[in-house]
Amino acid sequence: MTYHPKSDFIATMIERGFLADCTDYQGLDEALISGCKPAYIGFDATAKSLHVGSLIQIMMLRWFQKTGHQPITLMGGGTTKVGDPSFRADERPLLGPEQIDENIAGIKKVFSAYIDYDSDAENKALMLNNAEWLDGLNYLDFLRDIGRHFSVNRMLAFESVKSRLDREQSLSFLEFNYMILQAYDFLELNRRYGCVLQMGGSDQWGNIVNGIDLTRRVLDHEIYGLTSPLLTTSDGKKMGKSQDGAVWLNAEMRSPYEFWQFWRNTTDADVGRFLKLYTEMPVDECDRLGALQGSEINEAKIRLANEITALLHGAEAAAKAEATAREVFEKGGVGGDLPTLTLSADELGDGMSIVQVIVKSGLAKSGKEAKRLIAENGAKLDDAPLTDAGLMIDAGALSSPIKLSAGKKRHALVQLG
């Protein structure tokens, strides 16, 4: 990156590793130094929570506000009904309006931890829903007024569509409309709120460029797009996934302890990069911690986990998670904040096989996986190797909670309720 920005926001994006591409660095830079400007990122409501893969976008909105501008979080109440086909191998399952509203309610909980919607400041954040303007569209008017500005040839050339067609996977007309609707979002946000910038992951580049082009054609306004890199870990895994599924941001879907543990398990090579992206620590300190070697890097990982967990769940939750981890790993204790499976007496009956208990606790996805874990000496019961897949757990065994472990890093408590 050879561009030398004047605005605090673009300088921060470049310095901390957020920036993949921008439609016009100089134009955007000039706009941002001329006063408070609105920018948005759209979030479709495909689940009841966002996961760690969306955290880079949330942090971009946070930095946008911290550098004096107005972030807009746009909930895709309308676009979720269609589903974004970008870089997907198949069509998304269609959700009904009630499920979408329920998902939006869950997603909204996270944003207030990062972004200020309540202050009286000029750059107070806005939470909007594109169903507000998409639900009432008249199809014929929309085709005539908006559809005529889109070239099908150009849309087919976008990488997100091309990659799907190259694999000879069908792309429905419904999905093809998604990019027109997202472009229309940018037009409406510019018209209603003076929004000058759309941000997103680099997979959204085609959709963002469409919105800029449409707004220039219809309103003759100058607006901009900026994308972040699509993050993978240094070992090539997609960000936001772990051994036991998506790393959700909502506490009821992934406990603060499990969230903390995900970051504590970061690969050595990713520590410095993640500190810059997911915390607000000074860049020099991020680089220093990321360069540590041997056992010292583990303290850097604890710092990473604490900082990220404190931002989302609060400092108390982060401190509690660290205390639990130290108790579990360093002292071999049980820890008061581990994921807990509570079995009722009826559920337990005369006894339940240890294989079933492992599956119910979430440490394995199936009985087959649990048996393999035991056979490969990867399972422990109260820190002792578990070798008998036929072991039965009865009420006597649960007179006090037991601790199950899968490998060195995943644990659960099992108790009688």
Image (cartoon, helix red, strand yellow):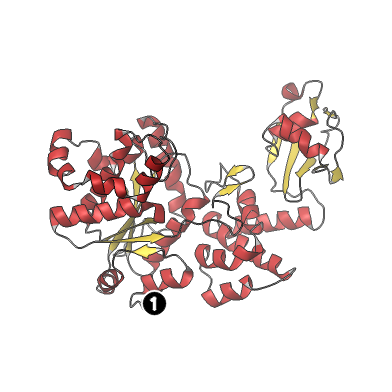
Quadrant showing the N terminus: bottom left
Q: Is residue 191 positioned above or below 341 on the image?
A: below
Depth check: 70 or 95 in front? 95
Judge from the rendering whether residue 324 lies leftward or rightward of residue 220; answer left or right: right
Residue 417 in view, yes or no: no
Q: Between residue 112 and residue 150, name the one nearer to us.
A: 150
Circle 1 is placed at which residue position?
Answer: 2
Q: Is 117 placed above or below 12 here? A: above
Side of 263 relative to 172 (left or right) = right
Q: How many marks?
A: 1
Lateral position of residue 198 relative to residue 49, left or right: left
**Badge 1 amino acid:** Thr
Q: Position of residue 234 (x, y in %)?
A: 59, 60
Q: Quadrant of residue 395?
A: top right
In the rendered image, the quadrant that contains the C terminus is top right
Q: In the visual, does 341 lie left or right of 81?
A: right
Position in image of residue 382 (x %, y %): 83, 43
x, y (%) of residue 336? 72, 48
Q: Is residue 16 placed above or below 50 in the rendered structure?
A: below
Q: Secondary structure at mark 1?
A: loop
Q: Residue at x 61, y 55 (%)?
A: 317
Residue nearest the observer in this picture, 376 or 31 = 376
- Give the residue drawn at x 17%, y 44%: 146
Question: Is residue 390 visible to us here?
Answer: yes
- Crowd around label 1: few <14 · some 14–19 · many ≥20 (10 Å): few
- Residue 263 horizontal/vertical position (percent): 62, 57
